[in-house]
Image (tube, rainbow, N blue to C red):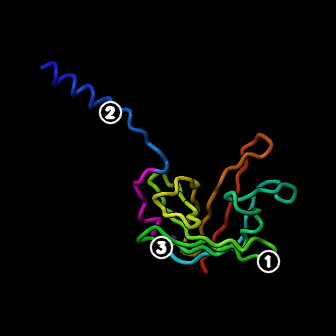
């Protein structure tokens, strides 16, 4: 009887201690299907953007993302991102992405690495999804304050 009680207590502790992460694997398939296809970032807005430089996704200045092309495939959660603006790096990479049940958009820039080996990624809020547009919202630290960066996507 003691063994059964100890086993039960251990099982309860294991279940209770299981972490709930925003990068969990439960997916919001309805929203994923809504954003499948080809998109372009129409604008990147944040307070003080005329004075402050923000490096988006540790890749390039946020202004370089205006006009960038994004492709989202919902059936396998893969895609591609291309920076196309002149005087910018011309960065191009496959991505893996999904929207979890907490309505967070999770993206990894693969840069020649297989998705299962890439452990770094970004978690953003996804807002205002319509047939032809949506927004990704990131929060960055600017002078000790959390600043909201809004990426406006429009369907191509």
Q: Closer to the camera, 85 or 42?
A: 85
Which residue is located at x 32 percent, y 35 percent? 15
> Magenta residues?
24-35
- In the displayed structure, does residue 97 sit left or right of residue 5? right
Disc 3/disc 1 C-alpha distance (Å): 27 Å
Residue corresponding to mark 2: 14
Q: Secondary structure at mark 3?
A: strand
Furthest residue to the bottom? Answer: 156
In which image quadrant can residue 45 be found? Answer: bottom right
Of the 4 image quadrants, the one containing the C terminus is bottom right
Percent across and percent down for residue 81 are 61, 71
Check disc 2 and report its element: helix, strand or loop. helix
CA gap between label 2 and label 1 equals: 53 Å
Q: What is the crowding at mark 3: few (fewer than 14 residues within 10 Å), some, or many (at least 20)?
A: some
Viewer-nearest residue: 150 or 55: 55
Furthest residue toward left = 1
**Residue 4 magenta:** no
Q: Is residue 66 left or right of residue 24?
A: right
Q: Is residue 34 magenta?
A: yes
- Of callouts 2 and 1, which one flags the residue occurring earlier in the amino acid sequence? 2
> Which of the two discs, 3 and 1, labels the residue nearer the N terminus?
3
Question: Which residue carries the number 1 mark?
Answer: 86
Disc 1 residue crowd, few under 14, some 14–19, many 20+, Cα 10 Å: few
Answer with the quarter of the image where residue 60 lies.
bottom right
Q: Quadrant of the N terminus?
A: top left
Residue at which label 3 appears: 73
Q: Which mark is residue 140?
A: none
* 3 and 1 marks in contact (CB < 8 Å): no
Residue ID at (57%, 59%): 126
| Residue 37 percent location from the top left of the image | 52, 77
Graded by Cα atoms within 10 Å as few (under 14), some (14 to 19) or many (20 or more), the crowding at tag 2 reads few
Task: Quote the CA–CA distance across marks 3 and 2.
Answer: 36 Å
């Amino acid at each position: 009887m003691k063994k059964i009680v100890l086993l039960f207590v251990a099982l309860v502790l294991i279940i209770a201690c299981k972490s709930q992460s925003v990068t969990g694997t439960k997916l919001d398939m309805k929203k994923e299907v809504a954003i499948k296809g080809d998109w372009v970032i129409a604008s990147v807005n944040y307070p003080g953007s005329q004075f402050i430089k923000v490096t988006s996704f540790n890749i390039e200045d946020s202004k370089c993302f205006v006009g960038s092309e994004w492709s989202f495939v919902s059936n396998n959660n893969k895609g591609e991102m291309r920076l196309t603006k002149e005087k910018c790096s011309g960065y191009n990479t496959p991505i893996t992405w999904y929207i979890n049940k907490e309505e967070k958009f999770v993206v990894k820039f693969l840069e020649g690495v297989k998705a299962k080996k890439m452990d770094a990624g970004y978690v953003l809020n996804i807002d205002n999804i319509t047939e032809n547009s949506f927004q990704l919202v990131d929060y960055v630290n600017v002078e000790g304050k959390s600043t909201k960066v809004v990426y406006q996507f429009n369907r191509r």
